[in-house]
Amino acid sequence: MAATEMSSSHPWQGFHGLKLILVSLLVGLVLLLLTPTMAQAKVMANDGEDGWPSARSLETLRDLDYESWRVVAYRAGPQEERMVLRIVGFPGRLRLDHPTDMTVHAGLHDWTLADITMDNQLLAGDVREAAAEFDLTALMADMNKNRPLRLELPGVFTELPIPPYVVEEWRSLPQDPPV
């Protein structure tokens, strides 16, 4: 009779296995929700502010203080020879005196991007001051690889990392307006 009692399973033994499965599923779900997914910048074609067709790269990125910023690169001007970088924050987050130039770091190289916000009549008259624009043309002309960049805007953020896939999108913007 003692041998029969030893071979019977304990009533809680099935519960332990179920508990282990539930904990594993919970951990997997938490990791899935908390792990950031790889985002892809998207080149979008639509009518620009002036009514002409335009292509732009749009991405939301976080700085080192974990603040979110919308980063938009697009071509502007006649024959779309100038590239513009627009940084958009939540209203009240991006208040700066214009012109305030932006510094871009990439390895041992540094560039200064001129603040051209006041050239855009829509931004110049916007009292929210939630966006700033910079001339990206010289930087893109110097870039021959899709390397990561670090943006620095005094008084706003000390480092906004730009991943290589976003730089690739910027470099792939068409010179000619889309039809």
Image (cartoon, helix red, strand yellow):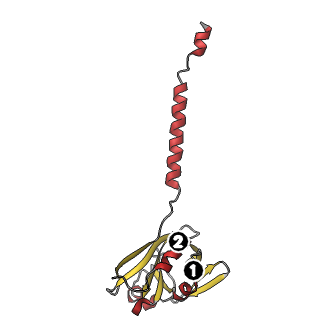
The kind of secondary structure element at disc 2 is: helix
Residue 133's label in the rendered image is none
Residue at the extreme left: 51
Kindly identify the residue that appears in the image at 42 percent across and 78 percent down: 56
Q: Amino acid at mark 2?
A: Tyr
Q: Determine if residue 94 is in view.
A: no
Kindly identify the residue that appears in the image at 44 percent across and 91 percent down: 119
Q: Amino acid at mark 1?
A: Gly
The kind of secondary structure element at disc 1 is: loop
Kindly identify the residue that appears in the image at 47 percent across and 85 percent down: 84
Residue at the extreme top: 1
Is 156 or 160 nearer to us in this picture? 160
Residue at the extreme bottom: 78
Mark 2 lies on residue: 165
- Residue 68 position, x and y percent, is 50, 69
**Dot in front, 2 or 1:** 2
Sequence-wise first label, 2 or 1: 1
Above or below residue 111? Residue 68 is above
Are the residues flagged by discs 2 and 1 in contact, CB closer than 8 Å? no
Whether residue 86 sits left or right of residue 16 in the image: it is left
Near mark 1 (Cα within 10 A), the count class, few <14, some 14-19 or many ≥20, is few
- Residue 137 position, x and y percent, is 51, 88
Q: Determine if residue 149 is in view.
A: yes
Residue 122 falls in which quadrant of the image?
A: bottom left
- Residue 24 position, x and y percent, is 54, 41
Kindly identify the residue that appears in the image at 55 percent across and 87 percent down: 141
Near mark 2 (Cα within 10 A), the count class, few <14, some 14-19 or many ≥20, is some
C-alpha separation, residue under disc 2 versus residue under disc 1: 27 Å
Position of the C terminus, as image quadrant, is bottom left
Mark 1 lies on residue: 155
Is 102 or 171 nearer to us in this picture? 171
